[in-house]
Amino acid sequence: MNRRLFIISSVLVVIMSCSKAPETSTTANTSTTSTTSTQATATTAPPPSTTQTMPNTATTAAAAPATAVLQSQETNWTGVIAEVTEFRRKGNSLTAKVRLSNKGSGSPDVQIFWNDVALIDAAGGKKYEVLKDEKGAYISSSRAGWPDRWEAHMGPGASQVIWMKFPAPPPEVKTITLQIPQVPPFDDLQIQD
């Protein structure tokens, strides 16, 4: 009889400790051992589980800030929208980041040849092409086996961020046009310094 009572009281202790709201203190497990029955023999109930409860990261982590969109354009790829999210001059180069998002129900193949991408300074009469490294590879997003382009099959809801580097226009140039094939020009883009 005492053995059954011991087992039942041990199960009750475990159930009560499981139904208890999680505590944030590291000493949360020390208070439940005193709830054992007084009819239990000299053997005490096993200590409650020592498994740590991990905080719910969905509620405790700060939400990631949404990326600002500097300009947005529909593209010639059905359902795909192009959004410039960064256009930053630093030192001798300017980095452009463009998010491509498929908002439609189709699955287009998106392909961008880097030799067709440029910055156009209409006021200064200058064109800036995507930079290349010492081996002739474009300094931009790339896919293995395709050094001259970026390519992706974009299913519904898919989103990809591509980037490219250009020579930096002079500091007095504050806005410029970004030209990407299959996308209307992003006119008068504000350069972030």
Image: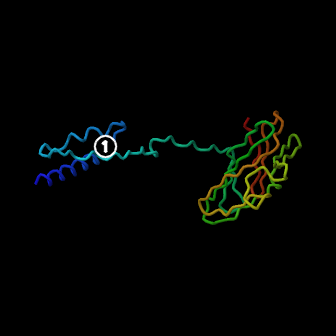
Q: Amino acid at mark 1?
A: Ala
Residue 180, image x, y percentages: 77, 53
Residue at the image position 34 percent from the left and 39 percent from the top: 23
Model colouring: rainbow
Please state if 189 lies on the left or on the right of 7 as rendered: right
Total labels: the figure holds: 1
Please state if 130 lies on the left or on the right of 57 as rendered: right
Image quarter of the N terminus: bottom left
Residue 21, image x, y percentages: 31, 43
Q: Residues within 10 Å of mark 1 (few under 14, many from 20)?
A: few
Residue at the image position 73 percent from the left and 42 percent from the top: 87
Residue 117, image x, y percentages: 80, 52
Q: Give the structural element (helix, strand or loop) at label 1.
A: loop
Residue 44 in which image quadrant: top left
Residue 137, image x, y percentages: 81, 53
Residue farthest to the top? 172
Q: Is residue 110 above or below residue 54?
A: below
Residue farthest to the left? 1
Please tell me which residue lies in front, 183 or 15.
15
In the rendered image, which residue does mark 1 sit on? 21
Image quarter of the C terminus: top right
Please tell me which residue lies in front, 188 or 151.
151
